[in-house]
Image (cartoon, helix red, strand yellow):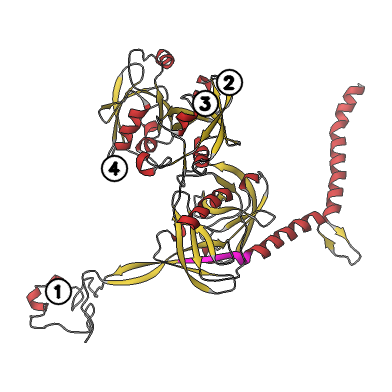
């Protein structure tokens, strides 16, 4: 009975404790002073002061960027055409309204030049019109400014408005569409500027501020936290290792800084995930370390040199994790090693699982690829791999990527566009899936939102032909895919363990 009474009284005790705690919290949040005015607790005042301090000290270095384009303006008459009567000459015979007709040419009519004015040519008039706008931030006192490639990359003219109201023409020093980073320059001195921090030091949950010009509203400040890091799977650019934040980012914020509470730039606001066009609390920023790697090269030589290993990689799916006896899907599978590459010289092998690159965890192939590309050629790095369940450390000297020779890693090839990944067929896999005596490559991963998934292709199938050409290994598959026309469907011949069939897929 005594035990029952304790159980019965326990909820009441909990409620009483909660009530007492609630009174304490209420008193903490509303502390009356001698003047009768309630004050917020000091911790909230400190946080508010920190936001204010960062905003006030960094905003002067944030700029508003406007771009212009030259376009052709064709002269049109009231009837939609060109000529003395604005389209009538297109509706009636030219001998009536032409220069030799009874009405001749009547200067000053819509679509016609007045006395002394030049005849309109077939190209029309060239006009400079507003093209777009965005944000940027100054990184040196002599006027170097960082922004996004999509803000200035296709512009014919760029102007920058400073926080003090001055507007200046800007020169694009360099722009890299594969990372969305651009560097521009204005002719000015003694400007306020921001320092790039170390984005490797950011923590999930850390407070950050975003400053920019959403919808043209200059120097707008929003606050949030670091929601995630290493977002490489969002398919925004070729080399992605994005910081995710819930600080409000909207159109016009692109190119603005993401700042920590020390006022350092930890990222460049670049994109949002939204179904409305506005902020839904999912924004992406380029990490400061990648910004530094790209901007230094743009400043020094106007072009980008990227690191290169020479391996074919893919993500670890649950099916692959089970096959390789892995406890988790984190890591990068080496599906192939190209001959004569730094990877081969270092001793990397097919089926290695890369778990760490240069002291940083390799969680997926997008972030791993970005980190390799962001390593200067000639540098030596340590790569930790799992090989047959044993952890090994391999030392590799990074080579230089040749885009013309091998194609840009990460640039969407036809194989990626249709949504499949493949691996060489081993004896064990042939026995497991029932492909003894056959040749081809095994489909190891299928994007659930891809054309391949919609057509019924699934992991474990054997891909035997692509566009009527036999593929017996990953290298042959890549060569055929690289030569495929992205504008035409891809014809695959697959074997599902019961029989072979053709499937035609159009890239997404």
Question: Label 1 belongs to which residue?
Answer: 89
The CA span between labels 4 and 2 is: 44 Å
Question: Label 2 belongs to which residue?
Answer: 390
Labels in figure, total: 4
Q: Residue at x 51, y 68 (%)?
A: 186
- Left or right position of 400 against 289: left
Task: Reply above or below: 303 against 490.
Answer: below
Q: Nearer the viewer, mark 4 or mark 1?
A: 4
Q: Nearer the viewer, residue 297 or 260?
A: 297
Which range of residues does the magenta coloring cover? 59-66
Q: Nearer the viewer, residue 62 or 18?
A: 62
Q: Does label 2 or label 1 sit earlier along the sequence?
A: 1
Circle 3: element type: helix
Q: Quadrant of residue 175?
A: bottom left
For the N terminus, which image quadrant? top right
Task: Reply above or below: 63 against 416.
Answer: below
The numbered mark at residue 174 is: none
Residue 96: % across, % down: 8, 78
Q: Quadrant of residue 150?
A: bottom left
Q: Nearer the viewer, mark 4 or mark 2?
A: 2
The CA span between labels 1 and 3 is: 70 Å
- Residue 269 in view of the camera: yes
Circle 1: element type: helix
The numbered mark at residue 318 is: 3
Question: Label 4 belongs to which residue?
Answer: 487
Circle 2: element type: strand
Q: Does label 4 or label 1 sit earlier along the sequence?
A: 1
Q: Nearer the viewer, mark 1 or mark 3?
A: 3
Q: Residue at x 46, y 55 (%)?
A: 301
């Amino acid at each position: 009975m005594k035990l029952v009474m304790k159980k019965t009284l326990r909820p009441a005790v909990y409620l009483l404790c909660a009530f007492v705690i609630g009174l304490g919290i209420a008193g903490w949040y509303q502390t009356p002073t001698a003047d009768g005015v309630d004050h917020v607790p000091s911790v909230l005042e400190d946080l508010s002061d920190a936001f204010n301090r960062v905003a006030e000290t960094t905003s002067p270095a944030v700029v508003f960027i406007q771009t212009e384009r030259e376009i052709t303006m064709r002269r049109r008459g009231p009837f939609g055409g060109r000529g003395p009567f604005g389209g009538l000459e297109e509706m009636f015979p030219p001998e009536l309204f032409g220069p030799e007709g009874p009405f001749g040419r009547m200067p000053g009519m819509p679509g016609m030049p007045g006395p002394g004015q030049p005849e309109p040519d077939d190209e029309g008039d060239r006009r400079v019109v507003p093209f777009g706008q965005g944000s940027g931030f100054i990184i040196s006192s002599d006027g170097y400014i960082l922004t996004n490639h999509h803000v200035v990359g296709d512009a014919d003219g760029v102007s920058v408005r400073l926080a003090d109201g001055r507007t200046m023409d800007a020169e694009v020093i360099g722009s890299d569409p594969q990372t969305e980073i651009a560097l521009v320059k204005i002719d000015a001195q003694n400007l306020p500027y921001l320092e790039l921090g170390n984005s490797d030091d950011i923590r999930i949950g850390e407070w950050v501020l975003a400053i920019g010009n959403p919808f043209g509203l200059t120097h707008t400040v929003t606050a949030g936290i670091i929601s995630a890091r290493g977002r490489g799977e969002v398919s925004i650019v070729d080399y992605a290792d994005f910081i995710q934040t819930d600080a409000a980012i909207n159109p016009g914020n692109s190119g603005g800084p993401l700042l920590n509470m020390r006022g350092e730039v930890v990222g460049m606001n670049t994109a949002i995930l939204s179904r409305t066009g506005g902020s839904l609390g999912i924004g992406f920023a380029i990490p400061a370390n990648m910004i530094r790697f790209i901007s230094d090269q743009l400043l020094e030589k106007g072009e980008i040199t990227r690191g290169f290993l020479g391996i074919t990689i893919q993500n670890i799916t649950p099916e692959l994790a089970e096959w390789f006896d892995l406890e988790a899907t984190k890591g990068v599978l080496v599906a192939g090693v190209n001959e004569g590459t730094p990877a081969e010289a270092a001793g990397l092998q097919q089926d290695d699982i890369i778990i760490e690159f240069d002291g940083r965890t390799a969680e997926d192939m997008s972030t791993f690829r970005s980190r390799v590309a962001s390593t200067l050629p000639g540098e030596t790095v340590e790569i930790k791999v799992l090989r047959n369940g044993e952890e090994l450390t391999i030392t590799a000297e990074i080579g230089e990527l040749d885009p013309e020779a091998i194609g840009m890693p990460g640039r969407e090839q036809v194989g990626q566009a249709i949504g499949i990944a493949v691996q060489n067929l081993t004896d064990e896999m042939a026995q497991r899936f029932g492909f003894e005596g056959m040749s081809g490559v095994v489909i190891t991963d299928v994007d659930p939102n891809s054309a391949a998934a919609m057509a019924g292709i699934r992991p474990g199938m054997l891909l035997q032909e692509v566009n009527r050409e036999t593929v017996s290994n990953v290298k042959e598959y890549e060569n055929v895919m690289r030569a495929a026309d992205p504008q035409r469907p891809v014809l695959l011949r697959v074997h599902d363990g019961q029989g072979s069939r053709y499937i035609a897929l159009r890239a997404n």
